[in-house]
């Protein structure tokens, strides 16, 4: 089996940056709600090469790619395999999500959940990517407490060929994940997650924390074992979390980096050079845009991500798998365009203006 694609990346950097990447729907196909996902593979892979060309890593087959909101397991399998092959062709850093979303709706026992995870883990490893053990709706529904999480994750970590990234997605991103790690109380859930990490530190590269809670993330970061990273998934507070403090810093695995890839890459270059002020000067102005894209209901942020990708010319139509292009209002997308201009993330403002006009005319 090939080594993980991330081992082929060039120079070491001061932080590890993963952009959680979206998929491009085939505009000629029926990608309506409840339909199997039909992906424009050429456009989807071109966008990944765009991210790699900037020096960013890619977190693929994650919630930004509409896992559980339009992207079914058949399309996800193809995405992982294609991204793995493309990553190898350029030495790109790649991590992919392994979850349980191939399970049919309804209740499942822990053994079935573990088997579903193991199937997806094998697909990711065969593709040569780092494994991200995604938070599982099925496990959240079935687990009776922390012990069930520790049992399932312990078995999966034993099967992993390389250290994995754990994934803690708050219920603002997915209400079905409420009470993850076996407790509704976040303090108790934090203790459960840290107990698992400390017991399996050699098998864990890091944990992605997406709780939109800066203080909690810093507290978790300071309690991680040596060598285990905290990948911020906080799309509201990422500049200061990545910049860090006198004790440490967060790496990043962010959906917003799909939308702001160019300034994110420039900011990382400055941070590599020791210019924290310059890093903040680039990223801080992008926060209002991020807060808008990830505004309530947060789980519809993918619509804004894809709209901005379309404005920037990365796909020919504003369409999404699962019909999710209709999940945000006209006013929301108009404001997104305005904020994107202020943040400096419109690659070609004239193209973006033309496409906005097409959207308003119903010709997107």
Image (cartoon, grey):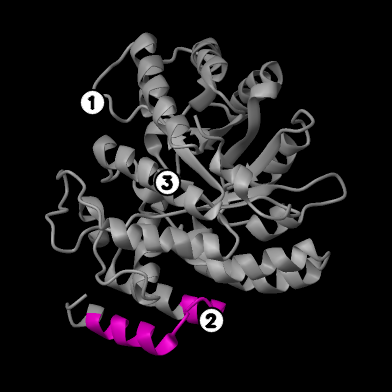
Earlier-in-chain disc, 2 versus 3: 3
- Indicate left or right for 332 with 39 as reference: right
Q: Nearer the viewer, mark 1 or mark 3?
A: 3
Instruction: Identify residue for label 3.
Output: 85
Disc 3 on helix, strand or loop? Answer: helix
Which of the 4 image quarters holds residue 349? bottom left
Residue 160 appears in the rendering: yes
Disc 2 on helix, strand or loop? Answer: helix
Instruction: Identify residue for label 2.
Output: 342
- Indicate left or right for 177 with 7 as reference: left
* Closer to us: 178 or 3: 3
* Quarter containing the C terminus: bottom left
Q: Residue at x 21, y 59 (%)?
A: 26
Circles 2 and 1 in contact, beta carbons < 8 Å: no
Q: Residue at x 44, y 27 (%)?
A: 121
**Could you classify mark 2 by the number of other residues whose Cα lies within 10 Å: few (under 14), some (14-19), or many (20 or more)?**
some
Instruction: Identify residue for label 1.
Output: 105
């Amino acid at each position: 089996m090939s080594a993980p694609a991330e081992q082929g990346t060039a120079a070491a950097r001061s932080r590890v940056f993963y952009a959680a990447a979206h998929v491009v729907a085939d505009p000629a196909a029926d990608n309506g709600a409840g339909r199997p996902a039909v992906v424009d593979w050429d456009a989807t892979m071109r966008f990944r090469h765009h991210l790699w060309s900037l020096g960013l890593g890619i977190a693929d087959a994650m919630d930004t790619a509409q896992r559980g909101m339009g992207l079914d397991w058949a399309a996800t399998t193809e995405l992982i395999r294609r991204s793995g092959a493309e990553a190898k062709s350029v030495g790109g850093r790649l991590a992919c999500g392994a979850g349980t979303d191939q399970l049919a709706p309804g209740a499942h026992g822990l053994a079935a959940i573990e088997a579903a995870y193991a199937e997806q883990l094998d697909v990711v490893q065969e593709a040569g990517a780092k494994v991200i053990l995604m938070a599982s709706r099925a496990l959240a529904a079935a687990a009776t407490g922390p012990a069930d999480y520790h049992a399932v994750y312990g078995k999966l970590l034993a099967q992993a060929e390389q250290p994995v990234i754990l994934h803690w997605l708050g219920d603002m991103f997915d209400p079905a994940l409420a009470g993850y790690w076996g407790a509704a109380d976040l303090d108790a859930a934090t203790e459960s997650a840290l107990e698992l990490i400390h017991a399996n530190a050699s098998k864990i590269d890091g944990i992605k924390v997406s709780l939109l809670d800066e203080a909690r993330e810093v507290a978790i970061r300071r309690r991680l074992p040596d060598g285990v990273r905290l990948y911020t998934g906080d799309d509201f507070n990422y500049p200061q979390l990545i910049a860090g403090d006198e004790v440490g810093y967060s790496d990043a695995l962010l959906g917003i980096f799909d939308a702001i890839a160019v300034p994110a890459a420039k900011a990382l270059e400055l941070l590599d050079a020791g210019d924290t002020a310059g890093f903040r000067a680039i990223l801080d102005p992008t926060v209002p845009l991020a807060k808008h894209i990830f505004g309530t209901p947060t789980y519809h942020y993918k619509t804004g991500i894809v709209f901005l990708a379309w404005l920037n010319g990365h796909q020919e139509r504003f369409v999404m798998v699962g019909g999710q292009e209709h999940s945000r209002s006209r006013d929301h997308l108009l404001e997104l365009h305005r904020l994107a201009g202020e943040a400096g993330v419109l690659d070609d403002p004239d193209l973006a203006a033309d496409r906005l006009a097409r959207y308003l005319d119903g010709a997107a």
